[in-house]
Image (cartoon, rainbow, N blue to C red):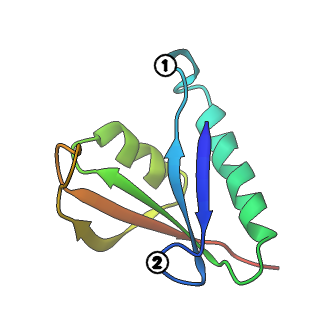
Amino acid sequence: MASVLRRWNASNKAIIGLLVFEPQWRGCGVGRTAVRHIEALAHTWPGIDQLRVAVVRTNGDALVFWRKVGFAGTGEIKPKYGPFIDDIVILEKTIYRN
């Protein structure tokens, strides 16, 4: 399951708000494939050149995954709020256009 919002916090960005798989599908390349599909979709959106994701700081597996698929930290940290158990780390990836 994935959720992506266009023009999140800036007109040139889209945020992947959710990317979830059943545990048996983790670690077998499905997530990487899903991110490639999301990138391909984002390529069709005029003006979008950055993908963004927010990860709870203590979710080490998710941070490793997002970095492996090319996302990098922006240095932006959102303080923990609501149901989150720790601060939120923001990562982004540039969508290169041909």
Q: Where is residue 31 shown, x and y percent of the image?
A: 60, 38
Q: Nearer the viewer, residue 37 or 6?
A: 6
Q: Where is residue 33 shown, x and y percent of the image?
A: 69, 41
Q: Is residue 75 left or right of residue 37?
A: left
Q: Residue 83, relative to residue 48: is it above or below? A: above
Q: Where is residue 4 shown, x and y percent of the image?
A: 60, 56
Q: Residue 39, relative to residue 1: is it above or below? A: below
Q: Secondary structure at mark 2?
A: loop
Quarter in which the N terminus is drawn: top right
Q: Residue 50, relative to residue 35: is it above or below? A: below
Q: Nearer the viewer, residue 47 or 62?
A: 47
Q: Which amino acid, by three-letter code, is at mark 2?
A: Asn
Residue annotated with mark 1: 23
Q: Nearer the viewer, residue 43 or 9?
A: 9
Please, which residue is most extreme toward the front here? 82
Crowd rating for badge 1 (residues with CA inside 10 Å; few <14, some 14–19, many 20+): few
| Occupied quadrant, residue 96 | bottom right
Identity of the residue drawn at 35% across and 37% down: 61
Q: Residue 18, relative to residue 45: is it above or below? A: above
Pointer 1 or 2: first along the chain? 2
Residue annotated with mark 2: 9
| Occupied quadrant, residue 39 | bottom right
Q: Where is residue 16 shown, x and y percent of the image?
A: 54, 56
Quarter in which the C terminus is drawn: bottom right
Q: Secondary structure at mark 1?
A: helix
Q: CA distance from mark 1 to mark 2?
A: 31 Å
Please, which residue is most extreme toward the top here? 24
